Amino acid sequence: MEIIGNGFIARHLRPLAHRHPDTVVFAAGVSSAGSLSEEQFAREADLLYSVIRRCTADGRRLVYLSTSSAGMYGARGCRGREDEPVFPGSAYARHKLALEAVLAASRADHLVLRTTHLVGPGQRPHQLLPSLTEQIRGGSVVVHRGAHRDVLDVRDAVAFFDGLLTVAEPRQVINVASGTSVPVEEIVAHIERSLGTVAHKTYRHGAAAYTVSVERLARLQPGVHARVADPAYYRTVIDRYLGSPPPPARAATEGEQR
């Protein structure tokens, strides 16, 4: 497996590299769901275009990591299914959907994996759990009231990726998520319980709950899905994260976004 990128997901995928020699995983995209940077979006698009051309020429399968966040599936009436229309509500999700369309129109053998909020060692500080945890440890946290998040341990995500690259038919879109949308207030409360502290909270308006369908994922990877399907799974994800040693300080490198 060739892995494009050097960020959080890319580093966790490296142990799989020898198992999928005819696969290229594009894991060098914009990492923040709140990003509005046209420059970052353009850089990701240009890099993906070149990788599509290369994979079309040499016949390798290209795996593109998209998003199953609220930005993709949060529109009213959306059921979070891969085979139904979506109406993205964020610039980031619209960007991801546009690149999915480029892939779909190409001749490249490909899979699109719409990943949820992944959690684990080595995350960048702006991402969900590192950000909330640091705020709570500092004594004050901003809570987006009504917002929900589907969280998945990166190690479980890697297990899903490994299985999907073996069994999934090409040219599919597959959600990779737990399937449980958890209120951010509950995530904050569990972090506080685990740390043994209560932070001062500043409340802001957040988006409503959203749904990510994992029917296709569960059918293709029933074993891994069974261990993440418990509605209380998010607590296990948080506890694993808080029990992980902090990564050593390191400088970001070019292309290190995911």
Image: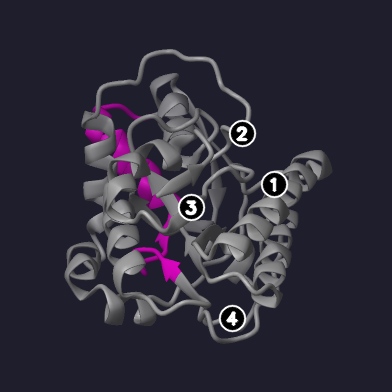
* Percent position of residue 92, x then y: 69, 54
| First-in-chain label (1 vs 3) | 3
Question: In the image, what residue type sits under mark 2?
Answer: Gly
Determine the CA span between mark 1 and mark 3. 12 Å
Callout 1–callout 4 Cβ contact below 8 Å? no
Q: Secondary structure at mark 1?
A: helix
Location of residue 195 with respect to 174 vertically, above or below: above
Decide whether residue 106 is among the magenta residues.
no
Location of residue 11 with respect to 95 vertically, above or below: above
Callout 1–callout 2 Cβ contact below 8 Å? yes
Snapshot quadrant of residue 22: bottom left
Mark 3 closeness class: few <14, some 14–19, many ≥20 residues within 10 Å: many
| First-in-chain label (3 vs 2) | 3
Q: Circle 1 is placed at which residue position?
A: 47
| First-in-chain label (3 vs 4) | 3
Residue range of the region highlighted in magenta in the rendering: 175-198
Q: Circle 3 is placed at which residue position?
A: 25
